[in-house]
Image (tube, helix red, strand yellow):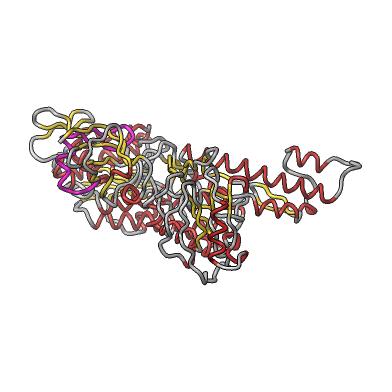
Amino acid sequence: MTKYFEVIGRDGPARRGRLRLERTINTPALISKDRIVSAGSLWGFGSVEEALEEADGHIDKDKLFIPPHVSVPLHVEPPVDLPQIETDGPCGLVVHPFFLDEPYPADVYIMGAAGSLRNPRELLKAVLEVKEKTPPDSALYAPALATPANLALLVYLGVDLVDSTRVVVDGYLGRYHTHDGTWNIEDLRELPCRCQHCRALEEEDRPDQNQNQNLRMISDHNHLKLEEEIRLVREMIRRGCLREYVERSVRVTPEETTTLRLLDQEGRYLERRTPVFRKSVMYSNTAESLHRVEVTRYAKRVLDRYRAPESEVLLLLPCSARKPYSKSRSHRLFAGALGSWRKRIHEVILTSPLAVVPRELEEVYPAAHYDVPVTGRWDLEERDWLLGCLDAYLERSSYKKIIVHLDGELREAVEEHGIDAVYTGGGTNGEALSRLTKAVKEAAIDASVLDHKRLRVRAVTDYFFGSKSSDLLLAGEVRIKGREVQNGDKKTLATLTPNGTIALTIEGARRLEPMGAALGEIGEFLPSGAVLSPGVIAADEEIRPGDDVIVRGEKAFGVGRARMSGWEMVRATRGVAVELRKVEEV
């Protein structure tokens, strides 16, 4: 049970937290040796008993205490298991990632031989092994590994604490670090940094200048660049845009790019730690953006949870720069061209990287919160992803007619793929819109009118709470007034929020409770304002930060927003699990 570390914010696997020592450390952070008291390696003592006895004299409640540990190379199994040392202060524990059973509780877990992790697969495996086997509210410390160039990636992997060991040593070896990589100081004709250390290095004819002083200044420069980078990374987490920063940063070396691409293949690890919504725009600027968890999660939920309406006519439309699409000039023109026939057709937008976006889900993150470079060109990977999703979507639907109002390479891709449809050529000029009107009128002449408001509520509810959950919410006499879903007594059951999520009332939560989705079980108490993780007995594994959550206990029933994932609520011993919006005493 951790007492001294608490997670206060998340951006995917990256976290912001607080490590309470004599002075609180806001993580991710550099931790210096003066904040640590280590008993040292077991090999420095004559016996295990001597090491444990000596360790008692090192405990300091104001610093991170690291008990005796077994120092071994990266792929060597420690020959000795040391017992737990009880301490009333913050405790760290050295663990060996490739030989790790369930470790005893600690506030900080230190990866043994982390400085040897250079291979992308080994680095990824090591971090994931430790993260999966340690409590979610403990910090991960990777010593002797961080540089200004790889720091953002390490934090995105899940590392909370690093040190300056590597860059300081490199400085004394004449290696000059920046965010954009490492150079031998002799190879630089001029220094790109203008910090005080670099200015001093460039001074000529200094009588006191010598090689040792120069190397010390390079080392100080390296340390400064690492400090600057950690501050920037913390700010990226606060803004919810660390992923975009990492995609830019990993271009420094092939190894870092490889690590990110391998990480994206670890879908379960990422998805379990990624919120369902964030305030910042999701920029899709690189090839890696196509594989980020927000994209794959959206596509999976559309294909697994969303139910296409019983519509005879499907209209495929292009995306727009403005989001949500319906507010853009092009989609307003499309709506005008469709006129009253719009009630008889179903609209789906094709886009990169999200592939298939039903009109009802255009406000759901990230459909209304992404931006992508527009060139009109579609590479093979984008085409395969979009067409694969489109095929899967059409297999689960029952449209009799399809109209494709696309142009350029997107139209070519769909047509060459063999989609049987009426192709109108796309465009927003008068002639193009006339073609669209004619095609829709001919296709929908005998089609039934759709209740788009109800379909929207159904789609959003199913997206967040699971397939067919909307059948419970919309059962009986229900009306939709604006963004509110009301029962026959005009009591609000749920509200569709402007950010694309859904907010349940107590009445709505009681309707969905039998599903068991987004449900958290708490102890025998009446919470006020928030439910802390120690009070959570059980929780739906599918709950993610930002989800609406139903809270149920012997004395309380309420609704609120998740601050952590369901699995984390159960395992964590600190932190807010759910911010309550409404709670009633049972």
Residue 86 visible in image = yes
Q: How many marks?
A: 0
Q: Is residue 89 above or below residue 418?
A: above
How far across and how far down the image is residue 330, in percent? 37, 35
Magenta span contains residue 84: no
In the foreground, 453 or 305: 305
| Left or right: 448, with 378 as reference point | left
In the foreground, 300 or 341: 300
Q: Quarter-wise, where is residue 551 in the image?
A: top left
How far across and how far down the image is residue 202, in percent? 82, 42
| Left or right: 212, with 44 as reference point | right
Residue 276 visible in image = no
How far across and how far down the image is residue 120, in percent? 54, 62
Residue at image coords 48%, 37%: 238
How far across and how far down the image is residue 391, in percent? 30, 57
Q: Is residue 494 above or below residue 411?
A: above
Residue at image coords 77%, 48%: 216
Q: Which residues are drawn in magenta? A: 495-519
Magenta span contains residue 513: yes
| Left or right: 12, with 314 as reference point | right
In the foreground, 177 or 565: 565
Q: Name the quadrant of the C terminus.
A: top left
